[in-house]
Amino acid sequence: MSVPMSRALYTAAQVRAQDRHAIEQWGVPGFTLMQRAAHAAFGVLRTRWPQARRLLLLCGPGNNGGDAFLLGALALQAGFEVRAATLSDTAQGDALLARRAFEDAGGVRAGAVEACSRERFDVIVDGLFGTGLSRAPEGAAAQWIAWANASGRPILALDVPSGLDADTGVARDPCVRAAATVTFVAHKRGLFTADAGDCCGALHLDRLELPEPTSPPPDAELLRAHGLPPRRRNSHKGSNGHVLALGGDAGTGGAIRLCSEAALRAGAGLVSVATRAAHIGALNAARPELMAHAVEQQADLAPILRQASVLAIGPGLGQGDWGRALWQAALDCDLPQVVDADALNLLAAHPAPLPARCVLTPHPGEAARLLQTDTATIQADRFAAVRELAARYRAVVALKGSGSLIATPEGRVAVCPWGNPGMAAGGMGDVLTGIIAALLAQGLSPWDAACLGVGLHARAGDHAAAAGGERGLLASDLFLPLRELLNADPN
Ligand SMILES: NC(=O)C1=CN([C@@H]2O[C@H](COP(=O)(O)OP(=O)(O)OC[C@H]3O[C@@H](n4cnc5c(N)ncnc54)[C@H](OP(=O)(O)O)[C@@H]3O)[C@@H](O)[C@H]2O)[C@H](O)CC1
Ligand SMILES: [K+]
């Protein structure tokens, strides 16, 4: 299945191979690519900062620096005042040609960046490192990045914010925090997960006039924004599945309430809840559309399980005897299910084969337990972690966090470009579990349900944050935008 370039995500090595292919196979000189990159970046600069007239270029030793020099030459020809701070005089090849073009255009190389007063520059152009970054910036590069980040001036990053790993999205220390990034040829997958959201600013892609690559296939793909098509007129409540949400041990009844209400809001025809007797009254009062069942022992569950078409297990489940009994019942039944929270922790503690058509929704801590590692290792390469989880547990996995990733056991990966820090709040995961369960109940495959569910959840969070701010965002604030986005599919 082909992915449009706007949604195709590549590793840095794949993009560098595309650069080489353009140069060697299509005969496009590297310097020409660099000129196109400079034009693209200068165009973004003039659009975002139309009043800007004074630029400071931070130029690294390689072709990323070359991009910056050629942007500087264009700016000089347009009447800008430009200073270039260069890391070293080791530029070679195209980067050396670019530096000479800058000097021929009257470009002046700045002395120590600290000598450049903050007031003198409207925009700082980050041409230190791109896809060639191989380690944390050090020495003068590190000092310049820290100075630029603290300068109060907007930074335009070329190709990749310097210090950001283009493959993992991990920001080395220090890392440029750009107001905008213009990336060239193709999207690098690291621009969409981990620390990327804090470093890239507004992201622009320019293909540098290269045709779409035929091979290799992209390493991952961005989710696309969509909902579900209108329902058949001739529908009844049995037409849209029956989700059974299992969880809510003593003191955690809210989690299973959020999960089950989210399943209703995401279009499940019927939603039952198997939870502690103590929560039944509150559930019925709060959301009478739910069918709440008091379950105190596994035997209470059998008749309810027979009615369900999809399970959602984990929110507020706990890891005590009660939770373990419900988890074992879920493992023993061959229904599609979403496995979250303490059900994941029970799976990590007591590995067991999962029924087919499962979706696991770990946050990085749960993922670490599932892979017997630590959270830092998960976050150091989220792509590798989500692929390992999906392969080991033979299930679709949604690894939550900034830039959530979804993977199949075969290694296909989708990346969510939406969401905001306001969603780092209690209950958000419970809502996601209910959404994915409802989409499974409406007949979507685990992959489609996970991709659509993660996308709707994040977009609903962005809509709710736009309406009232990120801080104080509640999981239940997602319900109204969720419903609107779900029904917005134009197809
Ligand atoms: N024709 C093309 O390929 C095009 C490339 N574009 C731009 O080019 C960069 C990639 O350029 P490249 O020269 O491969 O690498 P960088 O410019 O990103 O890095 C320069 C060198 O910096 C060294 N390095 C790496 N990390 C550090 C560090 N932390 N401190 C100091 N120096 C570092 C590294 O050399 P080492 O041997 O020391 O590892 C790099 O070689 C791409 O991102 C685009 O911006 C055009 O845009 C399109 C055409
Ligand atoms: K850069």
Image: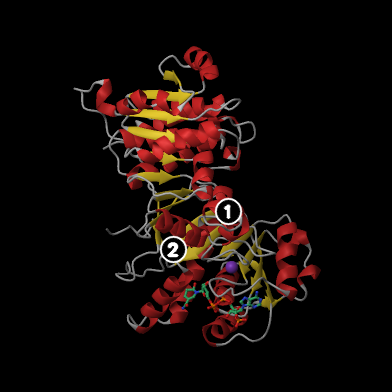
**Can you see residue 466?**
no
**Which one is closest to the eye, mark 1 or mark 2?**
1
Residue 13 as seen in the image, left or right of residue 140 = left
Asked where in the image residue 8 lies, by quadrant, the reply is bottom left
Label 2 near label 1: C-beta < 8 Å?
Answer: no
Q: Position of residue 336 (x, y in %)?
A: 33, 39
Q: Amino acid at mark 1?
A: Gly
6 to 277, vertically: above or below? below
Secondary structure at numbered mark 1: loop
Q: Position of residue 471 (x, y in %)?
A: 64, 34
Q: Is mark 2 within 8 Å of ligand 1?
A: no
Q: Amino acid at mark 2?
A: Asp
The image shows a total of numbered marks equal to 2
Instruction: Tell me how far mark 1 sits from mark 2, CA to CA.
Output: 16 Å
Q: Position of residue 444 (x, y in %)?
A: 30, 40
Q: Which residue is mark 2?
A: 206
Q: Position of residue 349 (x, y in %)?
A: 54, 48
Q: Nearer the viewer, residue 92 or 14?
A: 14
Q: Residues within 10 Å of mark 2 (few under 14, many from 20)?
A: some
Secondary structure at numbered mark 2: strand
297 to 222, vertically: above or below? above
Could you tell which of marks 1 and 2 lies nearer the N-terminus? 1
Residue 266 as seen in the image, left or right of residue 167 = left
Q: Residue furthest left?
A: 234
Asked where in the image residue 310 lies, by quadrant, the reply is top left
Residue 108 as seen in the image, left or right of residue 222 = right
Q: Which residue is mark 1?
A: 201
Q: Quadrant of ligand 1?
A: bottom right
Q: Nearer the viewer, residue 31 or 489?
A: 489
Residue 268, which numbered label?
A: none
Identify the residue shown where x is 60% and y is 38%: 422
